Every structure is written in C-alpha cells, then in structure tokens.
Image (cartoon, rainbow, N blue to C red):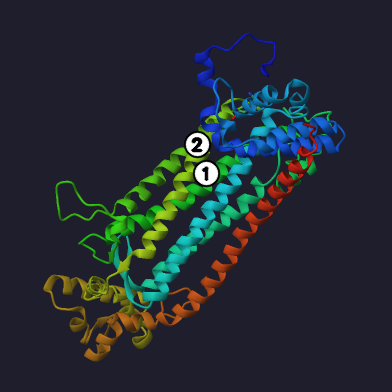
Amino acid sequence: MDVRGRRLRKQSDDSLAFTSSLGSDRRLGKWVVLVNMAHMVSLFEEGEVDRATAARCLRFLEAAGPDIAEGPGAEDIHQLVEQKAVDALGVKAAGFLNYGKSRNDQVATAIRMEARMDIIGLAGALLELQRALLDVARRDGKAVFPGYTHLQRAQPVTLAHYCFAHFDAFGRDVDRLLQLYERVNLSPMGAAALGGTSVRVGRARVAEALGFDGPVPNAMDAVSGRDFVVESLSCATMAMLDLSSLCEELVLWSSKEFGFVELADEHSASSSIMPQKKNPVAAEIARAKAGSVIGSLTAVCAILKSLPYSYNLDLQEATPHLWRGLDDATASVEVVGSMVARARFSKGPVAESIRGNFSTATALANYLVEKEGVSFREAHASVGGLVARSVKTGVPLEELASGTWEAGGRKVRVRRKTATAVLDPANFLSEISSPGGANPSAVAAEIQKRSEALAAAERSVSSLRTPLEASERRLRGRAREMSKEVKR
Ligand code: ARG
C-alpha cells in the first residue's frame, strides 16, 4: 500500500525529483527512526495503540540500519520510513506510526536533534582551538610581539596578549553556542501538522525520551519556527568572522615580509611550477570558508523571509544550508586549531620588527606628562615632531629625544639614558598597569584565569552530550525490550 494516499494521481518523476528532499535527508535518518520510536512508545503508554502493534513497529524501527534512508521515489525520509514499515509489517500495524504526528513536527524535531550534535561539535572544535592558543601563550607568551592598528605598527604587546585576544573572542563564540543550545533543545513533537492533535501523544514524555528539555510550547510555532536555524548559522558565522581574522594574520605573518610565524608543512602546500614555494593553504581555505558560511546564513534568511505561517515546503530548502554552514565552520575551526598547535613563532623577525619603529613613542609622551607637567596633547605634538624629524633625518628617536627640546611651550631636558629606557619595548610593557593590558608580569595569572574558564566551558559542553546519550540508550532499550514480545 502506498502511504501517499488516494487523493492524487502519481506525481511525475521530474516533479518528484525536483521537490524531494531525500538527497539531503540522509543526515536525519537516525533521528527520524528515534522520533518514530519515541512516538510509538508514547502512543502505547498513553493507551492509543495496543501492545502487539507497538511491539511490531518498535521491532521494525529497532532493526533499522543506516540504509533506512536509501530508496527511490520518496518525497522524503519521513515518507520513506513509513513506506518501508508498511511494506515490512503491513498497514494494519505500521499504519499507526503516523497516528497523531505529521512530517511537519517530525522534521522540525529531527533537524533540532541533528543540530544539537553539530552545535556540540562546533563548540568542541572552538575549545580545542582555544586550548592551542593558550598553549602558545604558555610556551612563548612573554615574548614581545608587535601590535598593529590599521595594519601599521602601533605598540609592542606580548605574544600572550595577542593569544588572549583571540582566545576571548572564541570564548564568546562558545558562550553563544551554549545559549543557542537551550533554544534548540525543545521538542516540536506533538504539534502534528500545526494545531496539535486529539490523539494522546504525550508531548512531554516524547520530549524527554528524545533528550529535549521540554516541548516547544505552541504547535504552530513548533512546525514553522526556523529561527534556530538562522541563529545556528549566525553563531557559526560569528565564529568564522573571528577565525578569518586569525587566518588572515597567519597568512600575512607566515610571509617573508613579516616572518613572525612558521606554519607546519602539514598545513602548507607547494607550487606546481615554483619549487621553492610554501603556501599557507589551510589558512587560506579557512579564511574563504567564512564567506561560504555567510552565504549559508544569507540563503536561509532569504528563504524564510515573508513565509506565511505555518509549514511551507520552502522550509525544506533551508535545511541543507544549515548542514553546509555548520560543517564548513567546524572543519575550518578544527584545521585552524591544529595549525595553531603546530605553528612556531619566530623570535628574530619579531624582535627586528619592534626595534626602531617608534612603537613606544606613546611612552615618551606619557613621560613628559608625568615628569614635566605638560598636557598630554602638547606632549603628543612635540614627540610627533621628533618622530617626523627622525623619519626625515634618519637619526634614531632615542638620540633626538636626549638633550633639551621644547614641549608645551617650555624647555624639557631628557637624559640619553632616560630616553633609551623610556623607549625600550621591554620597559614599555612592564610599565603597563591597566588590567587586561599587555604587561608580561600579568601573563601567568591571565593564563591561569583562562585555563580555568576553558575547563569550565569544556565541562559545560560535555555535560550536554551525556543526557543525550543516556536518553537514546533508554529509548533504544525500551524499544528492544518491547520488540521481544513480538510473536514469531
Ligand atoms: N521534506 C520535508 C522537509 O524537509 C518534510 C516535511 C514535509 N511536510 C509536508 N507537509 N510535505 O521539510
């Protein structure tokens, strides 16, 4: 018996091929089976389906392997599973599988179940990357590192300071995913097509069996709402924007012009014509993937825009963009994590870039304020004048700054020793007193703080996985136990 029903004649092959989601439904196969299991167990426990029928359906579902998603000519995985059950068990038993449920609530549920895993996976990859950044800080963090604004040398910082900046951004990406998870982890099941059902489906029971925190309250919202798809892709996009900046820096800094970092051969490729080349290919692709993820987000927004409530088949078109975006993001974060773990920061070129580049000139201006009582703006102007002279004449700033010169309408006298000390990058850093600044003496405590935060985030992420695994084990156990009752 064909589960499509009798209302319509056959859909044409071309039209079916065009509208079917089977090609991208494979990813939902496992979840569709579990949703059917939870629904059937609940129908039985609510007294809507007799024991023998439930047992036969559960035995079929329990035996379903990954090939459940394979098969020709179906509109989607939901129809395919039901059709296979009807073919195997007959319509007298399998005909109860869709009692009180629709593909609309089922697909929304299955997408959320897969999205949960993907969110956990992306968060896990981000945590690994954070760990790699923290390891760099631990290993070489006190080393002076050039800080840029406008990609012009600005002020020296420490390598750790730079690592912390990226670490903290990725930490917020993880936080966002954890907050998002709470909104994803609600069950649409029991919403049926859009308005609920007269069948006692046990919404709360099904939600719990599938590891959700509870049901989505409103049935129409449950089948129409895809804001969690937008939000997932938006979180992935934000992480990718953060990642793309890091990748851009790795590309720049691994070039001869900068020479700050040596990427491992494992993340590089050579050229087919230029035998000397070492190209930072993994960083380049990860940088580009940010564009692809933005594309996935944009596609979903455009698909959802102005859709009338409740379910429309347009929603089906959004789902593959979710998978593509989350997969791209996770793969990118993973590769950059191992790239950072294997990268080596080079001291020589870094030291070279810090020497004689005026990047400590702010300290000289501050010195004038403290010691000579001129206003900062006046000090800024006169140090700027010295720099201009140094650029023009090639005389080092230290030298121009020693002796007597004019600042804020008065004569200031700076000794050579003082000028050298004030402009020294190491002193510049050790004078920094503001919290969150780049003073090397703060590095150890800052690492400690972050490694505690990282451990807590790792616990939060792994604590999401545990109840999912437990509820799946319980549900499968229940199905197995009931399916034993089927008389052979
Ligand atoms: N294939 C659909 C999707 O992915 C499943 C729901 C279809 N619902 C329907 N009424 N045709 O969204």
Instruction: Give the residue type that dot 2 points to.
Output: His
Query: Which image quadrant for residue 144?
Result: bottom left
Q: Nearer the viewer, mark 1 or mark 2?
A: 2
Q: Position of residue 177 (x, y in %)?
A: 57, 53
Which quadrant of the frame does ligand 1 lie within?
top right
Q: Position of residue 299 (x, y in %)?
A: 48, 34
Give the residue drawn at x 47%, y 63%: 130
Mark 2 nearby-residue class (10 Å; few <14, some 14–19, many ≥20)? many
| Farthest-out residue, right | 47
Name the quadrant of the N terminus: top right
- Residue highlighted by disc 1: 233
Q: Is residue 5 left or right of residue 458?
A: right
In this rendered view, identify the residue nearer to me: 288 or 200.
Answer: 200
- Residue highlighted by disc 2: 321
Q: Position of residue 33 (x, y in %)?
A: 66, 36
Name the quadrant of the C terminus: top right
Query: Which image quadrant for residue 264?
Result: bottom left
Q: Is residue 24 left or right of residue 292?
A: right
- Whether the residues at callouts 1 and 2 have beta carbons within 8 Å, the answer is yes
